[in-house]
Image: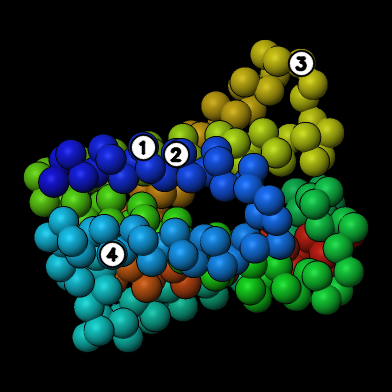
Amino acid sequence: MRRFAVGLSLGLFAWSNIVHLLPGASTAYVPLNLAAAGVVVGAARRHGLSWADLGLRRDRVGTGVRWGGACAAIIAGALATAVAVPDLHPLLDDARVQSLSPSAVAYHALVRVPFGTVLLEELAFRGALFGALARTADWARAAAASSVVFGLWHVRPTLGLLDANDIAADPVARAGLVAVAVAATTAGGMFFCVLRVMSDSTVAPIVTHTATNSLGILAAAITR
């Protein structure tokens, strides 16, 4: 099972760094990542992981929705506060959102994020990778290891974010910001793993992750 976890981690890194180079990758972002999510789940099942290992038991969906919904409500409240307080608007700035039309904002928040980003990341990191590691270690170690991989997965997206917002041209400053982003997403991954364990369902981090990213886009669009 550890061999599968290592192979999955390497495969995810390869996907993250190669998929954007494919012709039409940006347009096909959602179907490509949905296909990748299907491959991850299929590979996990072939290597012996059960639906319970993946956090995808049908009888736990309701619990996952309740846990995720509670977290989503807290996130929505925090973002609503940031929108309502002008001094907090700089925290919501994202140059990638500035040029989006209202329909594009809706597409990103309702389609691209939940189906193109969140499903792959949650099924891969809180589902398959965490499930495989939890077969050979206690849940805390499995959460820590899968979260570190999740943090490193965000190196390339962070570099893209820095470029889009014209931040930190200096290599040392860029490296520092990337390190901060990796640490932050690793911590986020740990939180998602705790949700996964507490609810016994990957649905909880899926809902929470979607709320964080999608509502963040909407908040950035409102305050631009």
Q: Give the number of the disc on residue 138.
A: none
Which residue appears at 55% of the width and 38% of the height?
17
Is 209 drawn above or below residue 16 in the view shown?
Answer: below
Q: Viewer-proximal residue, 73 or 179?
A: 179
Q: Earlier in the sequence, mark 4 or mark 3?
A: 4
Task: Give the Cα distance between marks 2 and 3.
Answer: 25 Å
Which residue appears at 25% of the width and 84% of the height?
58
Q: Give the number of the disc on residue 170.
A: 3
Q: Viewer-proximal residue, 139 or 42?
A: 42
Q: Earlier in the sequence, mark 3 or mark 1?
A: 1
**Residue on which the image places disc 4:** 42
Q: Report the quarter where the C terminus lies.
A: bottom right
Q: Position of residue 39 (x, y in %)?
A: 36, 61
- Does the CB distance between marks 4 and 3 fall below 8 Å? no
Q: Nearer the viewer, mark 2 or mark 3?
A: 2
- Does the CB distance between marks 3 and 1 fall below 8 Å? no
Task: Give the Cα distance between marks 1 and 2.
Answer: 5 Å
Q: Residue furthest front?
A: 23
**Residue on which the image places disc 2:** 13
Q: Position of residue 156 (x, y in %)?
A: 60, 36
119 sits left or right of 159 in the view? left
Please, what secondary structure does the residue beneath circle 2 have?
helix
Q: Earlier in the sequence, mark 1 or mark 4?
A: 1
Q: Give the number of the disc on residue 10.
A: 1
Q: For residue 188, say whether it is visible.
A: yes
According to the image, what is the colour scheme of the structure? rainbow
- Does the CB distance between marks 1 and 2 fall below 8 Å? yes
